[in-house]
Amino acid sequence: MSGIEALAERPGVTTNDVGHNGKRTHVAPETPGSIHEGGELGYSLSHAFGAVFDNPDLIAACVIGDGEAETGPLATAWHSNKFLNPANDGAVPPILHLNGYKIANPTVLARIPRAELESLLIGYGYRPYFVEGHDPEPMHRQMAATLDVAIEEIRAIPQAARTDGATVADRPRWPMIVLRSPKGWTGPKEVDSEAARARQAHRAPAIRGATRRGHAGDSKLEMAVLAARQKYNSFP
Ligand SMILES: Cc1ncc(C[n+]2csc(CCOP(=O)(O)OP(=O)(O)O)c2C)c(N)n1
Ligand SMILES: [Mg+2]
């Protein structure tokens, strides 16, 4: 069944309606829903905003890769904050993750001066907080403290909107976080006898046991992954 035929199967929609007489064939109030095809970059932020519209108690934190941030859909989705009504909608704190690379190639937002990046994000209507470093424990603490600040700010915005009678013209400045951490951070540094080239790590599973590339059991790798898991699972 084609997409259009499937649409016409929906209650209240006839084949004549599809694409005719002003009826919309794409996502719209009368044809709701969206499909996020896993693997295609660009839609994290717009989906996070979609999740919180008309969902006033929801906070959808959205981690955005610096590579994903270079896609057209993501670059425009920053402006979704213009459609957020604090009185009726939830909130999205975007977390822009600068690890410097898209797979193994350098990214623009990780390389422009910090002041320029800050101005860009302020220009998009956010209040950016920066969490930067490479030492895991202080970074976890810094991130937790920054999230606390962001959540407090987020909670205060709808309260003000509801109690003080703010209008759309008084659009609030929502908090967001810029997280700058090393590429491949906390991943295994060695696979086989060669360096794992942490900056090239990209969601590649560290495969257990022998592989077609000739890993011989990788017991060292498994130990490193297990140790890292135990360490971070027990982090207070
Ligand atoms: C629209 C689109 N273009 C290209 C790709 C191929 N691709 C997969 S991941 C990636 C880089 C993503 O970079 P980033 O968001 O920084 O993630 P990281 O590599 O740091 O994990 C690219 C270009 C894709 N999946 N979707
Ligand atoms: Mg990246």
Image (cartoon, rainbow, N blue to C red):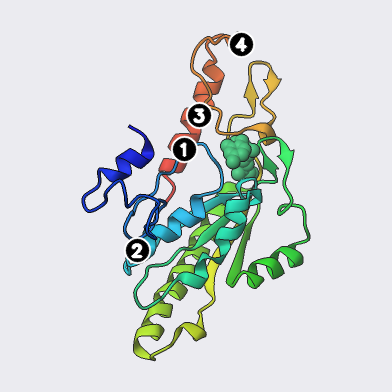
- Label 4 or label 2, whichever lies nearer to me, is 2
> Callout 3 environment at 10 Å: few (<14), some (14 to 19), or many (20+)?
some
Under circle 4, the secondary element is loop
Is 67 positioned to the left or the right of 176 in the image? Answer: right
Sooner in the amino-acid sequence: mark 3 or mark 1: 1
Q: CA distance from mark 4 to mark 1?
A: 27 Å
Q: Mark 1 and mark 2 in contact (Cβ < 8 Å)?
A: no
Question: In the figure, 129 relative to 39: above or below?
Answer: below
Q: Which mark is residue 58?
A: 2
Q: CA distance from mark 2 to mark 3?
A: 33 Å
Choose between 212 and 88: the one closer to the eye. 88
Name which quarter of the figure residue 157 lies in: bottom left
Q: Which residue is mark 3?
A: 225
Under circle 1, the secondary element is loop
The residue depicted at 44 percent of the width and 68 percent of the height is 151
- Label 3 or label 4, whichever lies nearer to me, is 4
Q: Amino acid at mark 2?
A: Leu
- Label 2 or label 3, whichever lies nearer to me, is 2
Is 1 positioned to the left or the right of 125 in the image? Answer: left
Q: CA distance from mark 4 to mark 2?
A: 45 Å
Report the image quarter containing ligand 2. Answer: top right
Question: In the figure, 1 relative to 175: above or below?
Answer: above
- Label 2 or label 1, whichever lies nearer to me, is 1
Under circle 2, the secondary element is loop
Q: Position of residue 88 (x, y in %)?
A: 34, 74
Q: Amino acid at mark 4?
A: Arg
Is 44 positioned to the left or the right of 53 in the image? Answer: right
Q: Which mark is residue 59?
A: none
> Callout 2 environment at 10 Å: few (<14), some (14 to 19), or many (20+)?
some
Q: CA distance from mark 3 to mark 4?
A: 19 Å
Sooner in the amino-acid sequence: mark 3 or mark 4: 4
Choose between 71 and 95: the one closer to the eye. 71
